[in-house]
Image (cartoon, coloured by chain):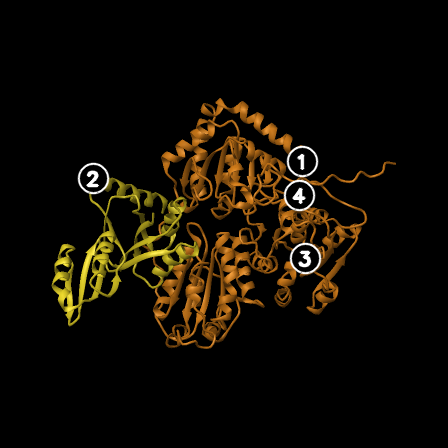
Amino acid sequence: MVLEALAREGCEVIFGYPGGVTLPIYDALYEHPIRHILVRHEENACFAAEGYARSTGKAGVCLATSGPGATNLVTGLVDSMMDSIPVVAITGQVPKHLIGRDAFQEADTFGITRSCTKHNYLVKDVNDIARTIHEAFHIASTGRPGPVLVDITKDALLAQGTIHAPGPVHLRGYKVSLEGHAGQIKRAAQMIWEADRPYVYAGGGIVSSSAAEELREFAEILQAPVAETVMGLGSLPSEHPYCINMLGMHGSYAANMGISNADLLIALGVRFDDRVTGRLDAFAPHAKVLHVDIDPAEIGKNRRADLPIVGDLKHVLRRLNKLLAESRDTEGRLKAASRFRWMEQIREWQQQHPFTTVQSDTEIKPQHLVREIDRVSQGNAIVSVDVGQHQMWAAQYVRFNRPRLWINSGGLGAMGFGLPAAIGAQMGNPDKLVIALVGDGGFQMSLPELSTIASYGLPIKIVIMNNGCLGMIRQWQELFYNRRYCAMELDCFPNCELLAAAFGLKGRIVERPQQLARAIEEAVEEPGPFLLNVKVTPEENVYPMVPAGGAVNEMILAPPQPVEAGD
Amino acid sequence: MLQLISLLVENKPGALMRVTGLLTARGYNIESLTVAQTLDPELSRMTILAEVDPAMRPLLIKQIQRLINVIEAVDLSEKQIVIREMMLVKVLVSDEMRAALLKEAEIFRARVVDAAPGAYTLEATGASEKLDAFLEMMRTYGELEVIRSGAMAMPRSSRQDRKGIAKGKELTKVSA
């Protein structure tokens, strides 16, 4: 019953881990075309489902048993909630007559996951299963996407029922407005042409609504800078002349200076996260705000919007582009000169402080490593990262030609995400190059998944940026805690060649900068999975940096490079 | 001042938990809460009085509105409303004071719902302040046992207010 409903929703693969109460589902899986990937921990089932969803745009499905299985999903659910990722989680529950009696592996999954899902269900009747699963997919993948959990009792899973064809889902309390208010869109066009220094702040909403093409058109009509949030990377191709990289805590100098001087902030599918805004009252202090989002609760949450539009970005941008294109030669002319000067100013900032190329002959700089990954990717590989310094460097240096290539835990910042998410991404994109770039901390949180990768022969290239410590913790302790380093060292890291061999994988340790390029090429050329442990300089910091709660234009830029003795 | 929220929710398991959970997750204390079915048996009406930071009130309403089981959420704090609460009071009263108590109760339009030797149980409805005053009065007669229902509120149907509600509804439509 469950599988039939999932199949009707187009589900091809489930990431799961069996248990007592979900055995009826596994019994059906025995002869069902849906593929099941047995992960090594339920948390990773949810992360993998997210990797699948983030890279394909389709809802990811994970399956766990009652009690510990369900509680292990929680981090992944919160993660997909924070980043608005469509995930349908199915959990088993103890039989109806045992609920509330502290049965073996019983947990109040419905209660526990209430706050970390967009919606959740407890199903106790076999005849509700199919309808509920269809509702779950509908809720997960429409409007502002998010995770939906369906908890099903074992007796319902075992019972025989009739499956109804999925009719149109009707939910009285759930309505999504896609189009956006026509009058507001008209006013937006006017507001845009009246601005001298417009600035586009593009986020995950562009990715969720598949509006990259519309964004490119918008930027080209407007000829204004587009900065992306960590969730929006790839919305506009990194190489595009109006793309000015990431903004926020570790954003580019140009992006952060731009936001501080703009007079119109065009916020598209963003939520004014504190890692972007820094001190709110110093964020875009001279700008009016035009905010487009599908979720009305985001409008005015952190920053008042002078002009709000509630709608799906693809629809709204299409209509806005049409209006702007029509008035380009009339109203669009008025401020064309100041917009041109503004873009010149942005380019000047870009040249003043680009992301610096740090390289050395004796040790591998982490920036050098991400540059090498960028070189083999050429903007086309799926890069799944963990959380910390390597994530920020990758966000700064790796180019993306389109959305859904950059996979990261943005809002929650969940370590241990990168490797299992890469599993999901590879399952969803069997022919694409998938690189899991992880730190030595996050890698050890997700290490059991090497076994999953090995057993399914998933050709993921795992690159460990190994600095022997929790780099971001070290950086904060250095900068803000007077170098009182505490609990940041990660010694006793396993020998990766032996570790890889233990799982029957190929692996390699890289310690010298001269070996790096070749080693990465070798990993990519290898048809199967590859584990690369790259030892990098431990004391390297991510710059620019806006200290937490600081103003975005008060960045700590890279410390001056020591001057090499001349010849 | 407390925030007064009126909600129309689907009459489904978990709907109450979602709403109260959202409030408690933000550290807001719920002062009173009433829930019951509406004329449409699939829906329930909830009235919540909670201590909410005034700056957070519009956001809270939108976040409640976002819940799948919630059909409508309206902030009635600043609106023209009818607000009523019901109370049951058991007064342990001496024989010589019984007549005086009944007279006093009449002033507050409280009704006797149960009588026993040495005790009366009275039912009173009204605005919370009126019930507070009634309680003060009853205290002078003897020991009390009290149950209050919590506030129920409905917008007044004046023209100005109708405009207010309509606006609220329109906003809901645009935003949902």
Compared across the picture, whether A527 is left or right of A428 comes to right
Mark 4, secondary structure of its residue: loop
Residue holding disc 4: A543
Q: Chain of mark 3?
A: A
Figure chain in yellow: B
Mark 1, secondary structure of its residue: loop
Mark 2, secondary structure of its residue: helix
Compared across the picture, whether B7 is left or right of A226 comes to left
Measure the C-alpha gap from mark 1 to mark 2.
61 Å
Closer-to-camera residue (A47/B100): B100
Residue lying at 36% horizontally and 48% vertically, measured from the top left: B61
Name the residue furthest right.
A567
Q: Chain of mark 1?
A: A
Measure the C-alpha gap from mark 3 to mark 4.
22 Å
Measure the C-alpha gap from mark 2 to mark 4.
59 Å
Within-10-Å neighbours for mark 1: few <14, some 14–19, many 20+ = some
The residue mark sitting in front, 2 or 3, is 3
Q: Quick check: marks 3 and 4 in contact, CB under 8 Å?
A: no
Measure the C-alpha gap from mark 4 to mark 1.
11 Å
Residue holding disc 3: A486
Which mark sits nearer the N-terminus, 3 or 1? 1
Q: Chain of mark 2?
A: B
Rendering colour (chain A): orange
Residue B174 visible? The answer is yes
Q: Chain of mark 4?
A: A
Residue holding disc 2: B159
Residue holding disc 1: A353
Q: Quick one: quadrant of the N terminus of chain A?
A: bottom left
Q: Quick check: marks 2 and 4 in contact, CB under 8 Å?
A: no
- Residue A299 rendering spot, x and y as whole percentages: 43, 42
Where B89 falls versus B175 (above or below)? below
Q: Are marks 4 and 1 on the same chain?
A: yes
